[in-house]
Amino acid sequence: MQESQKNFKVPPKKFQPRGISVLYEDRDILVVDKISGLLTVSTDKIRENTAYYLLTDYVRKGNPKSRKRIFIVHRLDRDTSGVIVFAKNEKAKFYLQEEWSNFTKRYLAVVHGTLPKKEGIITSYIVENKAHKMYSVDNPKKGKLAKTRYKILRESNRFSLLEIELLTGRKNQIRVHFSEKGCPVAGDKIYGTKEKGIKRLTLHAASISISHPHTKEKMSFEAPIPVYFNSLLNR
């Protein structure tokens, strides 16, 4: 762990927003671990119960007149848990977004069944239909290139735990690729099968490695695997 991260003291839980654990903070970035079920940003229907809203209030320390704010760098799906990086000024935001494709993003997922290869790279071209659902095509002129590297960490009778690295960042990429391989992410109601007894989408942004927008120092952040993933594998 870098010296700057060692020096950062995580604020007491009572000062952290509900559903969010602060992993690291300085004058340029705020890195958190988000629970499953919490939106990153607002929608037409939900305005306040989002990571963005709660963390804006957090950096303002409850003072509505404060000019402090955070900036969106990337998003996680509502039902995906794990690491999110926010910027605390526009200069940091632009740097992180420009460099985003150079950063390493690692996920953990529990999928149904077992894959024939213990590790590999899934490649396709992904497009979105009128119902805002993503799917793969073979034609590079019709879709955007999507590449997902995976490795099987553990298998049980019904499920597999995968370590996944996003080599591209397309919408719903992980969920689409493993669904099309016949091993949908457990709990995926859109690309998988609705199954009773599965409490959540078992997709977790486990770690991210970035270069700091100000110091250019390489920094890595991790969010521990949700306990539920192992309990599902142990069924």
Image (cartoon, rainbow, N blue to C red):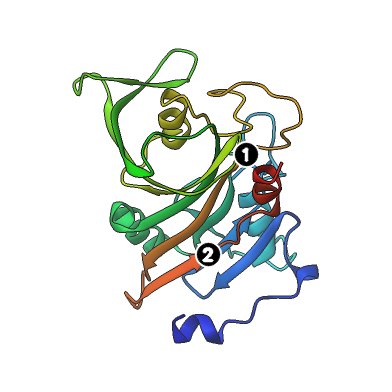
User: Residue 55, percent across and down?
Assistant: 64, 58
Quarter of the figure with the C terminus? top right
- Residue pointed to by mark 2: 222
Residue furthest out toward the front:
157
When the figure is inspected, residue 195 is found, relative to residue 232, above or below; the finding is: above
Q: Amino acid at mark 2?
A: Glu
Q: Residues within 10 Å of mark 1 (few under 14, many from 20)?
A: some
Taking depth in this image into account, of 18 and 219 the one nearest to the observer is: 219
Q: Residue furthest right?
A: 14
Q: Position of residue 64 (x, y in %)?
A: 72, 60
- Residue drawn at x 49%, y 34% is 114
Residue 173 appears anywhere in the view: yes
Q: Note whether 138 is above or below 157 in the view shown.
A: above
Q: Does residue 184 sit above or below 208 in this rendering?
A: above
Q: Position of residue 196 (x, y in %)?
A: 75, 25
Q: Would you identify the image quadrant in which residue 159 lies? A: top right
CB under 8 Å between callouts 1 and 2?
A: no
What is the number of the mark on residue 79?
A: 1
